[in-house]
Amino acid sequence: MREQLVFLLQLQQSETKVRELDTAATQLPAKLDPLRRDLAKLQGMLDAERAKLTEADTWRKTQQDLVDREREALRTAQSKLNASKNSKEFGAASREVENKRKSISDREAELKKINEAATAGNTQLASRDKDVGALRDQLAEGEAAMAGQLDALRTQLAEAKATRDDARSKVEPKWLKIFDSLTTKRGYAVAPVIKGVCQGCHMALPPQLNNILARMESIETCPRCGRLVYRKELLEPKPDEAAAPPAPTDDNDAPKS
Ligand SMILES: [Zn+2]
């Protein structure tokens, strides 16, 4: 029985380790999620700005075409002015020249504004682009560093699982069944008894039960929490040699009615 208890303890310890490593390996990649979110947000802003600048550029080209056409019209109007034969023609041509000049001047002022805005926009875009690049580098570095950690964790996890499977194979099926059921219900199945008190639920065991435990001839359960119990001093003479059970939590230790 002593041997079975030792195996049960080993099983408990290795299962805890597997759970811890599994959680760590699952949670590790999520650590970079805030950085990924920042990057996606910045990239989105950058794309929107770039689209706006492209739109402004199209508008600018349209305006430039119009200016070119109006210059052409101005030249025609100037020719008419030069060719005017009387004051009526001269007056009409003068007004046309004047109108075209004004129109060109207005459009050029508008173009100047657009060009200034585009220059400012491009400068800002370049700076944002740099920020996004830096963030992307940071993420890549983080991922590279994490890949190493993750590999190490997975190796440890594989080792822990092998240890657990080995421990499981040594425990008799009837105890395995009880062990698994207790683990599901209580969080962990095997609890030490110190000075007659079950460390799983902190209840003082009946003295007779404590005496039975001292003989190590059977595996007994705590009358309150139902865990498999053993006298700590008999199985764990040195604290670093044997399994320490997980710290009991207060809320799931009460007996289920
Ligand atoms: Zn108990």
Image: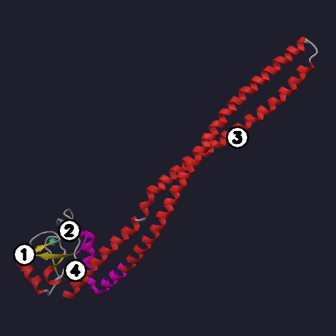
Q: What residue is drawn where x is 22% and y is 86%?
A: 4
Callout 1 secondary element = loop
Q: Residues within 10 Å of mark 2 (few under 14, many from 20)?
A: some
Q: The C terminus appears in which quarter of the rendering?
A: bottom left
Q: x, y (%) of residue 77? A: 86, 23
Amino acid type assigned to the residue bearing label 4 in the image? Asp
Contact (CB < 8 A) between labels 1 and 2? no
- Select label 2 or label 3 by which is in front: 3
Callout 3 secondary element = helix
Callout 2 secondary element = loop
Residue 13 shows in this picture: yes
Q: Earlier in the sequence, mark 1 or mark 2?
A: 1
Q: Mark 3 points at which residue?
A: 58
Amino acid type assigned to the residue bearing label 3 in the image? Thr
Q: Mark 2 points at which residue?
A: 248
Contact (CB < 8 A) between labels 2 and 3? no
**What is the chief secondary structure element of the magenta stretch?**
helix
Q: How crowded is mark 3: few (under 14 residues within 10 Å), some or many (20 or more)?
A: few
Q: Name the residue under label 1.
A: 206
Q: x, y (%) of residue 84? A: 92, 17
Q: Is residue 161 magenta?
A: yes
Q: What residue is drawn where x is 57% and y is 44%?
A: 124
Q: How crowded is mark 4: few (under 14 residues within 10 Å), some or many (20 or more)?
A: few
In the image, residue 174 sits, relative to residue 225, either above or below, namely: below
Q: x, y (%) of residue 226? A: 18, 73
Relative placement, left or right, of 67 versus 20 is right
Amino acid type assigned to the residue bearing label 2 in the image? Pro
Residue 231 shows in this picture: no
Q: In front: 164, or 117?
A: 117
Q: Is residue 177 magenta?
A: yes
